[in-house]
Amino acid sequence: MLEIYFIRHGESVGNKEERFRGQCDFPLNGNGIRQAEALRDELSSHHFTTIYSSPLQRSLRTAQIVADGRIPVIESEGFTNIALGAWENQPKAYIRQKFPELWQIWITMPEKLFFEGMETLGMVQQRAYHALRELLSRHSEGKIAVVSHRAVLKPLFAAMLGMAEPYFWKIQLDTASYSVAEYRPERGFTFTVINQNKHLGQYLREELG
């Protein structure tokens, strides 16, 4: 059996300021660093062979803090955040006012959202699931971790569980939370934990947007 810990990165300025992040490379803010350190302490008794991370610095720094110099950290483009084109680094309030029809799709069925320059959630799901299958070919047992983003992990979980659309708003993932899935070739994926956040003293719950 392989056990996979899926970690959402710690809080960044983009989270705090309620901006669409996408592939804009926001660093962790002070609270995000504290969250990653709390996550490190929470998971210190777990013996990960490898931690895979989105190359964006908010994820990579979270992975490095959790690794604590003891665990190899490998960047994986397959787990980088969704590309949101002109929406990246824009306040959500601005997008809601400027593009009300697209905003309504985003808050109701984001799986159907598309505009020029963006990557759809379906595209994200395909590349993230492909990246995960590559990890399964490298690891057959033990524990590994994947540090990524909300808009990557949600579609990835849906693929792992065979969830039909709409799925995005049915899963809550807080910054620096972790979820755990077991993988057995004869059975597939079994989630044992989703959105564990008890180690966090302070976090923003992003319910919409």
Image (cartoon, rainbow, N blue to C red):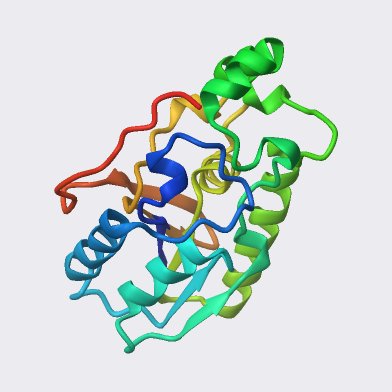
Left-right relation of 184 to 68: right
Residue at screen point 59% across, 17% down: 96
Where does the N terminus fall, quadrant-wise? bottom left
**Vertical arrangement, residue 51 with respect to residue 176, above or below:** below
Coordinates of residue 132 in the picture (x, y in percent)? 60, 62
Q: Is residue 144 visible?
A: no
Left or right: 126 with respect to 184? right
Q: Can residue 139 be seen in the rendering of this structure?
A: yes
**Is residue 129 rendered to the left or right of residue 151?**
right
Residue at image x 32%, y 74%? Answer: 65
Q: For the view shown, which residue lies furthest in the bottom direction? A: 70
Estimate the x, y position of residue 80 in percent, counting from the top left: 62, 58
Q: Quadrant of residue 88?
A: top right
Residue 163 at x, y percent in the picture: 57, 32
Q: Position of residue 187 (x, y in %)?
A: 50, 53
Q: Which residue does the image show at 56% across and 37% down from the upper left? A: 20
47 versus 80 height, above or below: below
Q: Nearer the viewer, residue 120 or 171?
A: 120
Residue found at x 56% / y 63%: 56
